[in-house]
Image: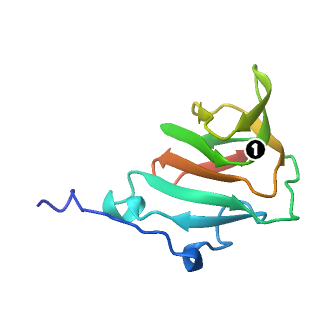
């Protein structure tokens, strides 16, 4: 197996959810994809911290790909040129690079998967 291909298998461990991601009102569980792809892709499960809510700030990400899939709960976002969207369990969103957006609110039980390319990406306030 070449150095560019690294197998990854990640099982649920509640201790792996950490408050070390982009937003302080979420806990993040790294799925090991960033390491397996040598930084090409990052994938994580994100959970809301009950009782903590977003401070809506418009921003954008400099990425080549970003996808969000809602596992449970809901989140409401406002997207540039689109308006408000309520994302619920089963909703899949592709956020194109540079789209200005902000999170308005989310449920205390929100849980989602986010996949982003590249693994290290910039977030800019707008």
In the image, residue 83 sits, relative to residue 92, either above or below, namely above
Residue at figure coordinates x 54%, y 40% from the top left: 66
Direction from residue 64 to residue 96 in the image, left or right = right
Residue at figure coordinates x 66%, y 41% from the top left: 89
Q: Number of numbered discs present?
A: 1
The image quadrant of residue 78 is top right
Direction from residue 59 to residue 30 in the image, left or right = left
Residue at figure coordinates x 80%, y 39% from the top left: 76
**Mark 1 residue element:** strand
Of the pair 109 and 78, the residue shown nearer to us: 109
In the image, residue 43 sits, relative to residue 105, either above or below, namely below
Quarter of the image where the C terminus is located: top right
Residue 94 seen anywhere in this rendered image of the structure: no
Q: Residues within 10 Å of mark 1 (few under 14, many from 20)?
A: many
Residue 89 seen anywhere in this rendered image of the structure: yes
* Residue indicated by mark 1: 74
Q: Residue furthest left?
A: 1
Q: Residue furthest bottom?
A: 15
Residue 96 in percent (x, y) is at 58, 30
In the image, residue 57 sits, relative to residue 65, either above or below, namely below
The image quadrant of residue 58 is top right
Quarter of the image where the N terminus is located: bottom left
Residue 20 in percent (x, y) is at 65, 71
Of the pair 40 and 112, the residue shown nearer to us: 112
Direction from residue 123 to residue 24 in the image, left or right = right
Residue at figure coordinates x 88%, y 65% from the top left: 51
């Amino acid at each position: 197996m070449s150095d560019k291909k690294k197998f990854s298998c990640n099982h649920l461990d509640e201790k792996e959810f950490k408050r070390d991601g982009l937003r302080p009102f979420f806990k993040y569980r790294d799925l090991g994809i960033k390491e397996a792809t040598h930084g090409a892709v990052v994938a994580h499960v994100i959970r809301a911290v009950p009782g903590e809510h977003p401070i809506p700030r418009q921003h954008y990400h400099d990425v080549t790909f970003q996808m969000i899939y809602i596992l449970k709960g809901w989140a409401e976002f406002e997207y540039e040129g689109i308006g408000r969207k309520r994302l619920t369990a089963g909703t899949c969103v592709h956020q194109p690079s540079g789209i200005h957006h902000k999170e308005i609110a989310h449920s205390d039980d929100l849980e989602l998967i986010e996949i982003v390319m590249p693994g290290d990406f910039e977030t800019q306030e707008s």
